[in-house]
Amino acid sequence: MQKSPKSPRQPTSSPSSRRLVRWHADVTASLVVFLVAVPLCVGVAVASGVPAELGLLTGIVGGLLTGLLPGSSLQVSGPAAGLTVLVYEAVQEYGLGGLGALVVAAGVVQLVMGALRLGRWFRAISVAVVQGMLAGIGLVLMASQVYTLVDAKAPGNGPANLGGLPGLVAGTAGSDTGPAALAIGALTLAVLLLWPRWRRAAEVLPAPLVAVVLATVAVFVLDLPVARVEVQGLLESVQPPGLADIGRLTELGAVGTVLAFALIASAESLFSAAAVDRLHDGPRTDYDKELIAQGIGNTACGLLGALPMTAVIVRSSANVRAGARTKASRVLHGVWLLVFAAAFPAALGVVPVAALAGVLLHAGWKLIPWRELRPLWREHRGEAVVLAATAVAIVATNMFEGVLLGLLMAVAKSAWETSHVHLEIVGMEESARPGTRRPILVRAVGHATFLRLPRLLDQLEALPRDREIELDLSGLRHLDHACAAALGSWAEQRRPAAGAGSVGGGSGGPGGGRPSGGALV
C-alpha cells in the first residue's frame, strides 16, 4: 500500500517572537506619529495664542495618560486644529489660567457623559452638522493664519479677518518682513502638497515635518528676517488655574465655552474613532469608555494649564498606516514628545512662525469636505444647506452659536421631511355631471403636522363648494393638535355650504396622535 506524501511542516512562531514583532511595529509607528505630532502640536499652540510648549504638553498627556486608558486602542489624542478658534477666543477673554479652568470643567462634563453612557448617542448627530462645523473651523482658521503667514497680526474674529484681507495685501507689499515670511509660507505649502506624491519617502518622513524642517533650514541659511517661535521651557509654561479662574466658571459665557469644548471635542473624538475602526481589523472602540478617557485627559490638561485635547484623525490614521498593533504605539509617542520637549526646547526657537502657519492653512483646507459637497447637493440638498449654514454661522458668529444653529436646522429639516402628507381625491370628475349628489372622497395619508398645514388647507379650500365632501383621516400615521383643530374648523365652515351633505372626518380627535379611522359627520 502506497503512503501518501506528508505535507511539509509549516514553521510556527513562538509567543516571544510574536511579541517581538508587535513591539517592533509599535515602536516604529510611535516614531512616525511623533514626527507628525511635533509640528502640529506646536502650530496649534501658536495659533491658539499660547506658548508652543503647551501644545506639546497636551500631546504628552494624550500619549502617556489617555493612551493607557481603555476605549479605542489605536487612535491618538492631542491638540486639534478644530478647537484652535475657540481656544484663541477663550484665551483672549479669560487668560491662560482661565483656559485651564475651562478645560478642567469640559473634562468633567465628558466624564459625566461617559458615566451616563451617552457616548453612543454622538453617532446620532447629523453628519451635515459635523461637516459644517469642521468646514466653518477650517474657514476661520485659514482666515486667521493668512495673517500669520506674512508675520502680521489678525484683526480678530472671522468677519474682521475676512474684511481685512484686501488691506493685508497692500500691507504685505510695503512690509520689511512680510515678503520673506510669505516666501517661507509658500515653500511650506508647496512641500505639503508635493511631498506625499513621493510615496516611499512620505511613509518614512511625514510631510508636515519635512515642510517645517526645510523652511527652518531656508531661514537659517538665508538669514531671513522673519518671526520665530518664542520658547519659554516646558515647566515655565505650565500655569495651573487659580481659585479666581475657577470662580469665573459661573459666568454665562464661561458655561457656554465649557459646553462647546466638551461637545465639540467629544464629537470629533468619537467620529475619529469610527473612522479609525474602519482602517484596521483590531478591537472596536467602546464609545463610552473612550469618552471617559478623553474626559480624564482633558481634566489633566486643564490642571496643567494646557490646551484641550481630542482624538486627531491625522495622527490616528498615521498610527494605523505605520503598522501599529497595540496602544503601546500611542503611549511611546507621548514618551518621545516628553523627551523632545525636555531635552531639546531650544529647537523650537529656530522654527519660523510662517512655516507653522502654512501647516495650519493646509490643515484648515483639509477640514472643508470639498469632495463631498457636489454629490451631497445632488442627492441630499437639504443636508447640503445645513452644512453650508453651519459653516457660515460659525464664521459670522462663533463656534457654539454656529453649531447650535446647525443642530436646530437639522432638526427642523428632519421634522419637515417626516411631516409629509398628501390628499388622495376620488370623485372630482363627476362634478361636471349635472344633478349628481355623490360626495367627493378625500383621504389624507402621511404625517399631518403644523409644518404642512398651510398647503393642506389650500388643497381643501380648492375643492368645489357645491359638493359634499367625505374626509377620511384613517390613512394618517400622525395628526398633531394644530392640524386636528384646523381640520375641525374647516369641517364646521363647510357644513352650511354643503347643505344636507356631509363632511367626513377621522376619529383621531383634536388631541393629536394617530387617527383610528374615518366617519361621516
Image (tube, rainbow, N blue to C red):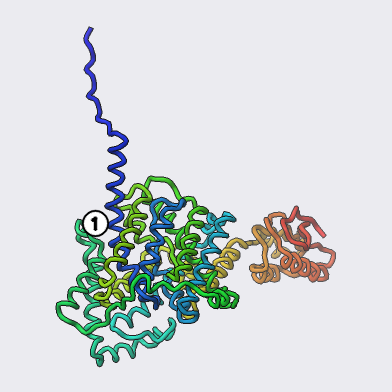
Q: Residue at x 57, y 60 (%)?
A: 112
- Tell me where residue 289 appears, x and y as whole percent: 50, 53
User: Where is the N terminus found, in terms of image quarters?
Assistant: top left
- Image quadrant holding the C terminus, namely bottom right
Instruction: Depth check: give the residue in front, 74 or 517.
Output: 74
Please, which residue is most extreme toward the right here? Answer: 500
> 142 and 55: which one is in front?
55
Q: Which residue is drawn at 33% across and 83% down?
A: 147
Three-letter code for the amino acid on which mark 1 is drawn: Glu
Residue sitting at x 44%, y 54%: 274
Label 1: which residue? Answer: 203
Task: Look at the image and tell me whether residue 364 can be seen.
Answer: no
Q: In this view, does 490 lie to the left or right of 272?
A: right
Percent of width and height locating residue 403: 51, 71
Q: x, y (%) of residue 69? A: 45, 53
Where residue 139 sits, quadrant-wise, is bottom left
* 414 or 504: nearer the viewer: 414
